[in-house]
Amino acid sequence: MSDFVTQKSVKARKQHNCSECKGFIPTGERYMLISGAFEGQGFSFKRCGACHHAFVWLDMTLRLGPYGMPPDEGIEFGALRAELAEYACESRFTDPEPLKHLHGMAERYTAAQNTQEAQ
């Protein structure tokens, strides 16, 4: 089997949901589309711009940190919130960056839930 992953920035032609924060990706907004196959199963994930920014920040922080995340490891799809929370705990909440990203994810999720309830 051939395992592969592709990632590209695309412009939303219709509204989507972010696979990380579960918030809306509005029509016309750019987002990251990650797709591929692993062990014979296809997958596709959409990551809004804010979550992608948080992902890149956390990935670089973990790779360049004192213990260094190995090149063959990474943050699992859909686990960004948990990884940010874990990093915030391990840094004893002294770094405001993961808290800022977690707050943004919570706001986007709440806004999407409120919009769905109003419909």
Image (cartoon, rainbow, N blue to C red):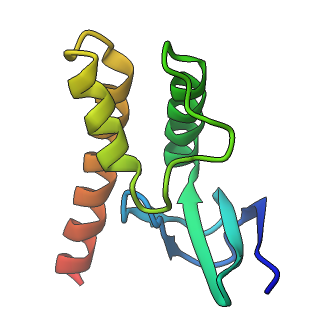
Quadrant of the image for the N terminus? bottom right
Q: Quadrant of residue 53?
A: top right
Residue found at x 25% / y 48% = 106
Quadrant of the image for the C terminus? bottom left
| Foreground pick, 115 / 36 | 36
Residue 66 in the image, given as x and y percentages of width and height:
49, 12
| Foreground pick, 119 / 53 | 53
Q: Is residue 113 left or right of residue 51?
A: left
Q: Is residue 40 left or right of residue 61?
A: right
Residue found at x 59% / y 27% = 63
Q: Quadrant of residue 116?
A: bottom left
Residue 36 in the image, given as x and y percentages of width and height:
72, 76
Residue 5 in the image, given as x and y percentages of width and height:
75, 67
Residue found at x 58% / y 67% = 46
Query: Compared with residue 53, is residue 37 higher up or lower down, i.e. above or below?
Result: below
Residue found at x 76% / y 63% = 10
Residue 35 in the image, given as x and y percentages of width and height:
70, 73
| Foreground pick, 101 / 65 | 65
**Count of numbered badges drawn on the protein:** 0
| Foreground pick, 113 / 53 | 53
Query: Compared with residue 53, is residue 89 higher up or lower down, i.e. above or below?
Result: above
